[in-house]
Image: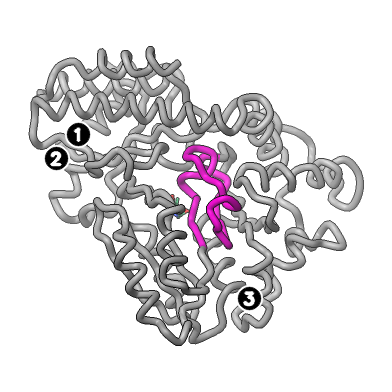
Amino acid sequence: MSLGFGRQYLAIPGPSTMPDRVLSAMHRAGPNIYAGELLDMVEALWPDLKAVAQTQAHVAAYIGNGHATWEAANANLFSRGDKALVLATGRFGHGWAESARAMGIDVQLLDFGKSSAPDFGQVEDALRADGAGSIKAVLTTHVDTASSVRTSIPGLRAAIDAAGHGALLAVDCIASLGCDEYRMDDWGVDVTVAASQKGLMTPPGMGFVWFSDRARAASAASDLRTPYWNWGPRAQASEFWQHWAGTAPTHHLYGLREALTMILHDEGINAVWARHEALAGAVWAAFDAWSAGNPNIGMNVADPADRGRSVTAARLGAPFATRLREWTEFKAGVTLGIGLGMADASDPAYHGFLRVAHMGHCNAHMTLGALAVMEAGMIALDIPHGPGALAAAAALIGRAA
Ligand SMILES: *Cc1c(COP(=O)(O)O)cnc(C)c1O
């Protein structure tokens, strides 16, 4: 028997659950792209896009996903042969580094493994060793979606300042924007990249790059910048089409409008961050209880301060993570995330990892429901686990709300 015939819950760390309001806003006839209400609506979108990243800087939007925003940032920031210092804390820092290398950028990689936040002392040392100041930018991931490691952006900024280095700071917030506290201007960030389908609760297909005046000035001479990727006209278009270097992503824009209204005007960004903090805490409380009864169960990141608030990476011991994911999806309608980047898919160990998303449009009943379904699956599959996980998660939600 399956008990999965009801509304499905996609609890993977992107694409995340889309609000019905976002879906409904997109369900409409195509607008005129040359004049009229679409243009007015988009004019009012830019201030909200800046507000969600807590910045007064510039913002360029692209029809593309997160990978597109890496290339957009690279193309604007660098010339061929320029040097980038890239921090990796799981999978996605490597991804940005690979994209930069393929574009002819000279990448120096600091790899902090799959479970640890960066050691800022190493960052400072690497910058001090660059006496000539040839490192043009430091690229980092805020929350690595594969490992769920969170990097302290103020900590990284302080390391760059302590080294007395003039490198720009560029941050991948694809998994964290609209979930984890993020303050681009207060934290001294020059470039932020994000995509539509995670905390921004909109279908995959739009990417965003916010950039400071300093980044814009530094990029003026970039020889990697082709017309499509150039952030200048996208951020300061004299004609509407220039925002998109062509046709606008019309329906995504209606969806995004609704999502930003929900985040900024209905709930408020501080409340959105607090909600994710509470939901993350419930998931962590459950894992702490489960792992007390089975050493194979555990969260990937030991220190809560180093954990992202939008996704939790965990292990259950192979093959139980895969078996549990299959059980929750087919028996109970909850799709959990695969364990990304922790082991190769051909390695039996791969089946020991999974991720629970608490990203974007999710609330207490969704997260508590997902945890209860996971525990039901552990019972069904005879996976040993410590008691009290659901009570601990519920207690946390009860105290937080
Ligand atoms: C999802 C994600 C990406 C890649 O985004 P795509 O839209 O899949 O290209 C990059 N970085 C982080 C941190 C992500 O979470």
Q: Residue at x 35, y 67 (%)?
A: 123
Residue contact between numbered discs 1 and 2, judged by CB atoms under 8 Å? yes
Q: Position of residue 310 (x, y in %)?
A: 42, 38
Residue matched to label 3: 218
Task: Decide: few, some or many residues near mark 3? Use Cα within 10 Å; few <14, some 14-19, many ≥20.
Answer: some
Residue contact between numbered discs 2 and 3, judged by CB atoms under 8 Å? no
Task: Decide: few, some or many residues near mark 2? Use Cα within 10 Å; few <14, some 14-19, many ≥20.
Answer: some
Q: Residue at x 66, y 24 (%)?
A: 266
Q: Position of residue 161 (x, y in %)?
A: 47, 66
Q: Is residue 184 magenta?
A: yes
Quick check: is the Cβ at mark 2 less than 8 Å away from ligand 1? no
Quick check: is the Cβ at mark 1 less than 8 Å away from ligand 1? no
The range drawn in magenta is: 170-199
Secondary structure found at label 3: helix
Q: Amino acid at mark 2?
A: Pro
Q: Main secondary structure of the magenta part?
A: loop
**What's the mark number on residue 319?**
2
Q: Is residue 375 magenta?
A: no
Residues at marks 2 and 3, CA–CA distance in whole angstroms: 49 Å
203 to the left or right of 363: right
Q: Position of residue 144 (x, y in %)?
A: 37, 51
Q: Position of residue 321 (x, y in %)?
A: 20, 37
The relative height of residue 238 versus residue 321 in the rendered view (above or below) is: below
**Number of numbered discs overlaid on the protein picture:** 3
Q: Which is closer to the viewer, label 2 or label 3? A: 3
**What's the mark number on residue 323?**
1
Q: Which is closer to the viewer, label 3 or label 1? A: 3
